[in-house]
C-alpha cells in the first residue's frame, strides 16, 4: 500500500521550504500541486500567494482584500484558491502524479471544494502535504487516516527529512 506523507510542525519551522525542496528533487513530470508563500511589504507579512508546480500564481490571502472569509488580519481569496490550487490537485490526481498540497489549513478549508478534493487525493496514496498543527475538524480527519504517515518537523530532524521523505515517495 502506498502511503501519503504529511508533514506538520509549528509555524515557521520550515514546512513549506521542506515540501518545495522535496518536490523539486522529484522528476518534474511525476509531481504537481501547489505551495504557498508569504507576500511581504516593508519587511511585514501582508498575505500569501498560491504557486503551482506548473508555474501558475495567485493570491491565497491578503490584508488588502475587501471580501472573502477572514482569518486573523487576512481575507481569503476563494476565487484564486478554486481556479489555481484546486485544478492543480485535480490534474495531478488524474495524471497519477505525486500530489503536493501546502497546506491543509484553515484558510484553504474555507473553499467548499478543498476538503473533498484533498480526500480524493489522499485516496490515491500519492500525497506529499503539510498540515496545520491546529487540532479539530478536517485536520484531525487527515491525521487519523490509516494511509497517512505523519511526520513532525523539528529543528533536530528538518535537515535529514528531505532524503527520508524522498525515499518514502519513490519506493
Image (cartoon, grey):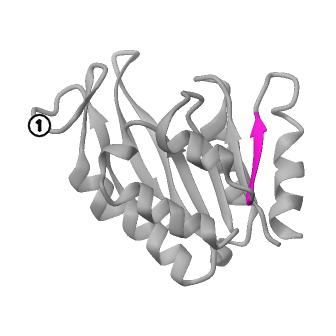
Q: Is residue 150 magenta?
A: yes
In the figure, 93 relative to 85: above or below? below
Name, please, the residue furthest toward the bottom: 95
Provide residue 166's location: percent of width, then percent of height: 83, 58
Nearer-the-camera pick, 79 or 40 = 79
Report the residue marked by disc 1. 67
Q: Name the side, left or right, on which 57 lies relative to 171.
A: left
Residue occupying the point 42% across, 62% down: 116
- Confirm whether residue 100 shows in the render: yes
- Furthest-left residue in view? 66
Seen from the viewer's position, the closer of residues 134 and 83 is 134
Q: Position of residue 25 (x, y in %)?
A: 75, 60
Q: Residues within 10 Å of mark 1 (few under 14, many from 20)?
A: few
Give the overall secondary structure of the magenta segment: strand
Residue 110 coordinates in the image, percent (x, y): 31, 44
**Residue 121, position as x, y percentages in the image:** 56, 67
Highlighted range, magenta: 147-152
The image quadrant of residue 49 is: top left
- Residue 95 quadrant: bottom right
Amino acid at each position: 500500500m502506498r502511503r501519503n506523507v504529511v508533514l506538520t510542525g509549528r509555524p515557521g519551522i520550515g514546512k513549506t521550504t521542506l515540501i518545495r525542496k522535496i518536490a523539486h528533487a522529484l522528476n518534474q513530470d511525476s509531481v504537481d500541486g501547489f505551495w504557498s508563500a508569504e507576500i511581504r511589504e516593508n519587511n511585514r507579512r501582508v498575505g500569501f500567494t498560491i504557486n503551482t508546480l506548473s508555474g501558475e500564481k495567485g493570491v491565497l490571502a491578503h490584508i488588502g482584500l475587501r471580501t472573502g472569509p477572514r482569518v486573523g488580519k487576512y481575507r481569503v481569496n476563494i476565487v484564486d484558491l478554486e481556479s489555481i490550487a484546486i485544478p492543480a490537485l485535480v490534474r495531478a490526481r488524474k495524471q497519477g502524479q505525486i500530489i503536493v498540497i501546502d497546506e491543509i489549513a484553515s484558510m484553504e478549508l474555507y473553499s467548499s471544494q478543498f476538503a473533498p478534493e484533498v480526500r480524493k487525493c489522499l485516496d490515491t496514496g500519492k500525497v506529499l502535504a503539510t498540515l496545520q498543527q491546529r487540532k479539530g475538524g478536517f485536520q484531525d480527519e487527515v491525521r487519523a487516516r490509516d494511509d497517512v504517515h505523519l511526520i513532525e518537523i523539528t529543528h533536530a530532524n528538518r535537515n535529514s527529512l528531505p532524503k527520508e521523505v524522498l525515499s518514502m515517495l519513490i519506493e
